[in-house]
């Protein structure tokens, strides 16, 4: 199939593997019931995209919404047990809908349910990756959701926006498309300011961009945009692109993927492509501690490609053990890197500020000269 693409950047993107994230608001109609017309059109569009040669993975929300519909609930459950029970009722029905609409195009769907614990463990992370890649090899369509039936705050991804970014990096997709009920990132909240305009391209996600999405100092919160921008940081830093666009627009996926017509906000890659292990360290692991370093250590990490040594450490926060992920910040509190720590917080409090030759004298033993080795560090 020969396709003329009109957006220069999208036309240069390899469209071999695409992650599409769907928000709950797209999947339910005004009566808060599953919108079967939308599901049907979605299946038709994805069938055409796959026919054109692209691999597609879907990250879906909606289990709780569909569960509420089946239970005739008018308000969203608040307690964790209620949410888990409603999600359990809705998830099966949600997958049945996907299976029904895609069966029309002879597309086999596969359910993948994940929690943070499934990917923070390196072995389980690789198992998840291998399963997804094997499903793609079988020409199946992975339908991925957070396992709300067992997830609690300690093991939740937070939002499916975050999960979609993780999946994009996990399977090394070419780009992520987040379908929402908004046209993209705007200069201000369009519900409040009629002069708000969609920002078509973001070269780099800066603090100013984060403020537009609902961070401190903004004109208003735009409801859900902030988590999408955080997802964008994970994707673009890893060398991938992301688009936020209005999933309710007719033929939106076909226009973007098949015809290169940019609609919404395109976030350009701002970093080099990372190997899988670096992505796991940077974007999957939850930091258990925070290490503040002096200017010399910051420059050694950022400009000289060096490891973190104890001599450059000024302050330590958190409760971490050997092998845990930590975030490294400069004297202004800005994150400069993440990595796997070689010493526990108790040990680090003893050796911080010391020369490497003094570690063994201070502790009575020495694991490594480096507190965080360069091979286990990702500069952000």
Image: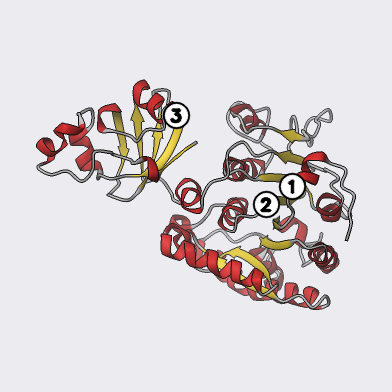
| Element on which disc 2 rests | loop
Q: Residues within 10 Å of mark 3 (few under 14, many from 20)?
A: some
Q: Is residue 285 above or below residue 223?
A: below
Left or right of 276: which side holds 305? Answer: left
What is the number of the mark on residue 174?
Answer: 2
**Badge 1 element:** loop
Cα separation, mark 3 vs mark 1, equals: 29 Å
Q: Quadrant of residue 291?
A: top left
Is label 1 in contact with label 2 (beta carbons under 8 Å)?
A: yes
SS class of the residue under badge 3? Answer: helix
Q: Quadrant of residue 378?
A: top left
Q: Looking at the image, is mark 3 or mark 1 earlier in the sequence?
A: 1
Image point (58%, 52%), residue name: 169
Q: Residue at x 28, y 33 (%)?
A: 309
Q: Residue at x 48, y 58 (%)?
A: 116
Q: Position of residue 84 (x, y in %)?
A: 54, 67
The coloring applied to the image is secondary structure
The disc placed on residue 13 is 1
Residue hosting label 3 = 302
Q: Earlier in the sequence, mark 1 or mark 2?
A: 1
Q: Nearer the viewer, residue 5 or 333?
A: 5
Q: CA distance from mark 3 to mark 2?
A: 27 Å
Quadrant in which the N terminus is drawn: bottom right
Marks 3 and 2, the one that precedes in the sequence:
2
> Could you say which is closer to the camera, residue 113 or residue 224?
113
What is the spatial separation of the Cα atoms under label 1 and label 2, in whole angstroms? 7 Å
Residue 206 in the image, given as x and y percentages of width and height: 61, 29
**Crowding near the residue tagged with mark 2, few <14, some 14–19, many ≥20 C-alpha atoms within 10 Å:** many
Q: Position of residue 188 (x, y in %)?
A: 74, 30
């Amino acid at each position: 199939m020969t396709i003329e693409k009109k957006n220069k950047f999208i036309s240069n993107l390899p469209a071999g593997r695409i992650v599409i994230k769907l928000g709950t608001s797209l999947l339910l109609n005004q009566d808060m019931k599953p919108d079967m017309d939308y599901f049907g059109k979605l299946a038709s569009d994805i069938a055409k995209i796959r026919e054109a040669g692209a691999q597609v993975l879907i990250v879906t929300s909606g289990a709780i919404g569909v569960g509420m519909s089946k239970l005739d609930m008018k308000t969203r459950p608040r307690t964790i047990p209620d949410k888990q029970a409603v999600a359990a009722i809705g998830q099966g029905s949600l997958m049945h809908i996907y299976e029904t609409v895609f069966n029309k195009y002879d597309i086999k769907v596969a359910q993948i349910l994940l929690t943070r614990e499934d990917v923070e463990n390196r072995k389980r992370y690789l198992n998840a990756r291998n399963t997804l890649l094997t499903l793609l090899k079988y020409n199946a369509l992975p339908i991925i959701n957070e396992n709300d039936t067992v997830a609690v705050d300690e093991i939740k991804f937070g939002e499916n926006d975050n999960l979609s970014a993780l999946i994009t990096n996990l399977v090394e997709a070419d780009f992520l498309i987040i379908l929402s009920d908004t046209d993209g990132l705007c200069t201000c909240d369009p519900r409040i300011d009629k002069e708000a305009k969609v920002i078509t391209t973001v070269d780099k996600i800066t603090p100013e961009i984060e403020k537009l999405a609902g961070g401190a100092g903004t004109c208003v919160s735009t409801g859900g945009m902030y988590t999408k921008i955080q997802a964008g940081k994970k994707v673009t830093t890893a060398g991938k692109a992301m688009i936020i666009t209005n999933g309710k627009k007719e033929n939106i996926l076909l226009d973007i993927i098949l015809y290169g017509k940019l609609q919404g906000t395109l976030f350009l890659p701002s970093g080099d492509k990372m190997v899988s292990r670096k992505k796991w360290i940077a974007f999957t692991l939850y930091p258990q501690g925070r290490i503040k370093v002096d200017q010399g250590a910051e420059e050694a990490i950022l400009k000289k490609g060096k490891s973190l040594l104890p001599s450059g450490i000024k302050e330590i926060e958190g409760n971490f053990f050997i092998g845990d992920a930590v975030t490294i910040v400069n004297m202004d509190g800005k994150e400069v890197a993440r990595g796997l720590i070689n010493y526990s917080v108790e040990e680090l409090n003893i050796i911080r500020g010391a020369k490497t030759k003094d570690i063994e004298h201070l502790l009575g033993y020495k694991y490594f000269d480096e507190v965080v080795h360069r091979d286990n560090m990702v500069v952000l």
